[in-house]
Image (tube, coloured by chain):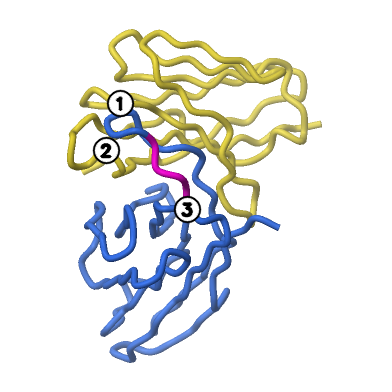
Chain colours: A yellow, B blue
Amino acid sequence: GQQVMQIPQYQHVQEGEDFTTYCNSSTTLSNIQWYKQRPGGHPVFLIQLVKSGEVKKQKRLTFQFGEAKKNSSLHITATQTTDVGTYFCAGLRGQIYNFNKFYFGSGTKLNVKP
Amino acid sequence: EAQVTQNPRYLITVTGKKLTVTCSQNMNHEYMSWYRQDPGLGLRQIYYSMNVEVTDKGDVPEGYKVSRKEKRNFPLILESPSPNQTSLYFCASSFRGVAGVGTDTQYFGPGTRLTVL
């Protein structure tokens, strides 16, 4: 079954509004990565979070990793039409023999109306 | 230019006809992986390889085979394709991270859209 749950599945916002997507894992993760996929394109790496409670920012994007390393969020402030796409989280479970086995969330598709 | 290439980009085939999707990277990455992407299910890992001759099953390995004879290449083989393998397939590669910490950036190929009739 799905190891990493991601919500919401879709989000439609007006340009300038904020956007947040959440990922939740049933098990502790060793780290979590975030990717963006434009329509018709391939996933592109955004960031990796490793430490418990870590917060990282990239311009208007803020990424958080939960204290228990089971959840993560991506927040976009003042969305722009260039933010359109599907955002995925990908978690690595902390098992010694499977530390390179990725579990992707189902993605949040963001649509931004100008 | 650093990149991951996949061929073919589009393929329509019939049930049971063996096919191979090639993947190649020019970044000297140890780690390579295959994913399939289906609507509502996100990306699911099929197989991954941590180095030459080292491969392991991902989440959905049934019906697929892989091999890693060279560092740069990681082909995906469908011995007897079935319609439920119709999907968008991505190959990805990255440097291996320190054991237990995880890997670095995954670079994805452009994708292969496969239709099995």
Q: Is residue A16 above or below residue B54?
A: above
The residue identified by callout 3 is B29
Instruction: Give the residue type that dot 2 points to.
Output: Phe
Asked if the residues shown at circle 3 and circle 1 are in contact, with their CB atoms under 8 angstroms apart, the answer is: no
Question: Where is residue B75 drawn, in percent x and y?
Answer: 40, 73
Residue drawn at x 23%, y 62% as measured from the top left:
B61
Q: Is residue A38 above or below residue B68?
A: above
In what element is the residue under mark 2? loop
**How far is the residue under mark 1 from the one under mark 2?**
8 Å
1 and 2 marks in contact (CB < 8 Å): yes
Residue A88: x and y in percent read 48, 37
Label 1: which secondary element: strand
Q: Which residues are magenta?
A: B93-97
Residue A58 is marked as: none
Q: Is residue B57 above or below residue A85?
A: below
Position of residue B114 measured from the top left corner of the image (x, y, whole percent): 46, 74
Q: Which residue is mark 2?
A: A99
Residue at the spot of label 1: A30
